[in-house]
């Protein structure tokens, strides 16, 4: 009875952690039903690697430390949960091998985030997030290539926007935490360019519903307010604003991604 009770408590805790960061854990549990869901979940992993490191760096700089700590904890739990579900759901040998490569990196990230912040670990987290992003990106490419449908491609693109919003914020947080270098500056600029290019492509996607267009316009409005900080045009630094607005963009793009998943399901013939 105690084991059963502990299992239930853990399940409830994980659900609320996922709810806390506004990412639908339930979506991961229907992976086997549809390739779009697989792409969505693997794509979500890309975002979580960047979000966790961003939160770790903001936590280290004592910027929205309480919020950053809670988000980081929830994101790590969801990263692990999604990773385990992917390993159980994927049958392709190449994708399975890529997931195995993630294992030691994920374990190291989990260990660092459970300990107190130290600057040296901040550098390690940046390296881990980069390596894990590359692996999960390769997984998404493999999965998307197995079902060349426009709806699946839209899920990937919108899902990647979630990641880019957090990646941009991560590099901004890295600079705030004392990790400024030509590399981080150039990577942030590249991520900004990729985000804007993909946003324009999504705006003219033929799959867009009124709801999708409304969310994309919301992203556009928020993006305009923070764009100068990423281009070096702003005279002052407002890290709290960056923290809040990039999270808003991520949540909006998460909603858009799920709407594309829904469109994919709707395009399928009824069984």
Image: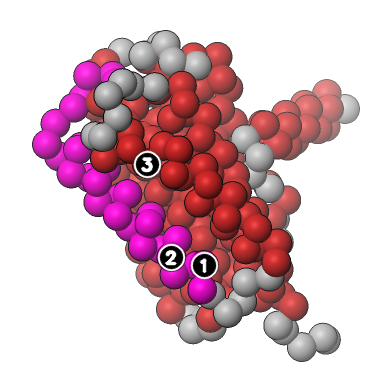
Q: Was residue 2 drawn as part of the magenta stretch in this picture?
A: no
Q: Are marks 2 and 3 in contact (CB under 8 Å)?
A: no
In primary-sequence order, the first of circles 3 and 1 is 1
Per the model, the C-alpha gap separating discs 2 and 1 is 5 Å
Residue 43 x/y as whole percent: 49, 57
Instruction: In the rendered structure, find residue 227 and report the number of the disc placed on it.
Output: 3
Seen at 43% across and 78% down, the residue is: 145
Q: Quadrant of the N terminus?
A: top right
Whether 110 is drawn above or below 93: the answer is above
The crowding category of the residue bearing disc 2, from other C-alpha atoms within 10 Å (few below 14, some 14 to 19, many at least 20), is: few
Query: Is 104 on the left or on the right of 48, as rendered?
Result: left
Query: Is 9 on the left or on the right of 136, as rendered?
Result: right
The crowding category of the residue bearing disc 3, from other C-alpha atoms within 10 Å (few below 14, some 14 to 19, many at least 20), is: some
Seen at 44% across and 44% down, the residue is: 224
The residue closer to the viewer here, 268 or 105, is 268
Per the model, the C-alpha gap separating discs 2 and 3 is 15 Å
Q: Which residue is mark 1?
A: 203
Examine the rendering and report whether any part of residue 236 can be seen: yes
Residue 204 x/y as whole percent: 51, 73
Dot 2 lies on which element? helix
The residue closer to the viewer here, 213 or 104, is 213
The crowding category of the residue bearing disc 1, from other C-alpha atoms within 10 Å (few below 14, some 14 to 19, many at least 20), is: some
Dot 1 lies on which element? helix
Q: Which residue is mark 2?
A: 200
């Amino acid at each position: 009875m105690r084991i059963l009770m502990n299992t239930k408590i853990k399940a409830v805790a994980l659900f609320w952690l996922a709810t806390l960061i506004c990412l639908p854990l339930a979506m991961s549990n229907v992976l086997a039903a549809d390739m779009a869901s697989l792409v969505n979940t693997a794509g979500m992993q890309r975002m979580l690697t960047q979000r966790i490191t961003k939160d770790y760096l903001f936590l280290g700089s004592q910027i929205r430390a309480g919020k950053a700590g809670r988000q980081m904890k929830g994101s790590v739990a969801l990263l692990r949960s999604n990773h385990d579900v992917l390993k159980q759901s994927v049958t392709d040998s190449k994708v399975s091998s890529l997931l195995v490569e993630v294992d030691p990196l994920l374990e190291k990230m989990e260990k660092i985030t459970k300990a107190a912040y130290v600057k040296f670990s901040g550098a390690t987290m940046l390296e881990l997030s980069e390596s894990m992003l590359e692996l999960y990106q390769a997984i998404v490419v493999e999965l998307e290539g197995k079902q060349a449908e426009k709806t699946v491609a839209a899920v990937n693109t919108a899902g990647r926007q979630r990641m880019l919003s957090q990646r941009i914020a991560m590099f901004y947080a890295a600079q705030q935490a004392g990790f400024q270098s030509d590399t981080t500056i150039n990577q942030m600029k590249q991520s900004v360019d990729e985000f804007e290019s993909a946003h324009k492509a999504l705006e003219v996607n033929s799959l867009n519903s009124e709801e999708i267009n409304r969310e994309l316009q919301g992203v556009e409005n928020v993006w305009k307010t923070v764009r100068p900080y990423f281009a070096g045009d702003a005279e002052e630094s407002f890290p709290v604003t960056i923290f809040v607005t990039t999270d808003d963009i991520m949540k909006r793009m998460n909603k858009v991604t799920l709407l594309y998943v829904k469109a994919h399901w709707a395009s399928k013939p009824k069984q």
